[in-house]
Structures are given as structure tokens and as C-alpha cells.
């Protein structure tokens, strides 16, 4: 059975690092040569202490199998509205298409409602789309983002 709960990043960092590494190699291939995985844990912790980082974990028999991390802030364009902007999310590939992702998203949404969030956003790499999951949660596609690595120029 998969369980979902709110946890602190500082409490799960060591457990999370192998999943982050697998996640990085799965979705970050287009700029992998120039961009190394190097989370700023101190910044995450500082923002978490301010209530600006929210983490939901997925566990199977106590083992970390997924995470959903978002930044919480009032939007610069709409200052009266609290946004939960997804930073990173991952679910073990063996659990995808089993309903676990939908359950995790539903749990996250419930948490955000309780926190008074007005808008939750999710971004995804084009190489690992999960548009049907977002659609099943009633989300709408609202933006397209482009990127280009210019660091090695």
C-alpha cells in the first residue's frame, strides 16, 4: 500500500538523493552536459522554515518511492493569490499508471486547499509528459516554456 504524507526536506534529504539522481537522468538529458544536479539544500531549508516549500512524499512499506515539492508564494502579478508552483515531482516508474500518481496529486491538492492555496501549477519535461494525469485532476494547460543552454558559449 502506498501512503502519502507531508514531510520536511531536511528529514528526507538522504533518502531522496538516489531518487533525485534517477529523476535527473530520466528527464534532464537535453542539457545534462552543462547542468549538473546540485540542489541548494540550505536554500530549500531556509524557504521551508518560512513556510514557502511544501513536500509530499509517497512511501511503500516505509520506503520513499516518490515526492512532490512545491514553492508556496503570493504571485507577483496577483498579490492576493497564493500559488503552489511545483518544483519537482517523481514517482517510481514501477508505480506509474497504477493510480498512485493520481492518488498523490489528490493528496497534494487536499493539502493545498487546507493551506489556502488559490492556484497550483505543475510543469513537466516534454520528454516525460503526464498531461493525461493533469487533465484527470481538472488542470488546464496554461503556458509553454522554452529553454536553451547558453552557459558554455
Image: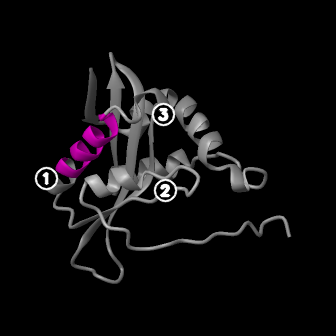
Report crowding for label 3: few under 14, some 14 to 19, many 20 or more residues within 10 A (C-alpha).
few
Q: Earlier in the sequence, mark 1 or mark 2?
A: 1
Location of residue 140 in the rendering, given as x and y in whole percent from the top left corner: 31, 67
Residue 49 position within the rendered picture, expressed as x and y whole percent measured from the top left: 34, 50
Residue under numbered circle 1: 114
- Left or right? Give the position of 77 relative to 25: left
Residue ID at (34%, 31%): 98
SS at circle 3 = helix
Q: Would residue 32 be seen by someone viewing this image from the given angle?
A: yes
Mark 1 nearby-residue class (10 Å; few <14, some 14–19, many ≥20): few
Q: Magenta span has 106?
A: yes
Q: How far apart are marks 1 and 2 (CA)?
A: 25 Å
Q: Where is residue 104 in the image (x, y as percent from the top left)?
A: 29, 40
Q: Which secondary structure lies at badge 1? A: helix
The residue lying furthest to the top in this view is: 61
Q: Quadrant of the N terminus?
A: top left
Q: Name the residue under label 2.
A: 124
- Residue neighbourhood size for the residue with mark 2, other residues' Cα within 10 Å, grouped as few (<14), some (14–19), many (≥20): some
Q: Does the magenta stretch include residue 1?
A: no
Number of numbered tags placed on the structure image: 3
Among the two numbered marks 3 and 2 on one chain, the one whose residue lies closer to the N terminus: 3
The residues colored magenta run 99-110
Frontmost of labels 1 and 2 is 2
Residue annotated with mark 3: 13
Quadrant of residue 112 in the image? Answer: bottom left
Amino acid at each position: 500500500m502506498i501512503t502519502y504524507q507531508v514531510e520536511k526536506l531536511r528529514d528526507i534529504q538522504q533518502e531522496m538523493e538516489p531518487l533525485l539522481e534517477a529523476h535527473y537522468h530520466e528527464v534532464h538529458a537535453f542539457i545534462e552536459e552543462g547542468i549538473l544536479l546540485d540542489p541548494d539544500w540550505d536554500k530549500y531549508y531556509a524557504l521551508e522554515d518560512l513556510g514557502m516549500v511544501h513536500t509530499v512524499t509517497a512511501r511503500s512499506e516505509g520506503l520513499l518511492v516518490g515526492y512532490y515539492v512545491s514553492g508556496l508564494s503570493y504571485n507577483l502579478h496577483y498579490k492576493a493569490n497564493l500559488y503552489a508552483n511545483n518544483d519537482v515531482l517523481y514517482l517510481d516508474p514501477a508505480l506509474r499508471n497504477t493510480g498512485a500518481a493520481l492518488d498523490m496529486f489528490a493528496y497534494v491538492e487536499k493539502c493545498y486547499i487546507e493551506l489556502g492555496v488559490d492556484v497550483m501549477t505543475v510543469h513537466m519535461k516534454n520528454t516525460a509528459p503526464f498531461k493525461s494525469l493533469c487533465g484527470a485532476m481538472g488542470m488546464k494547460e496554461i503556458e509553454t516554456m522554452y529553454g536553451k543552454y547558453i552557459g558554455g558559449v
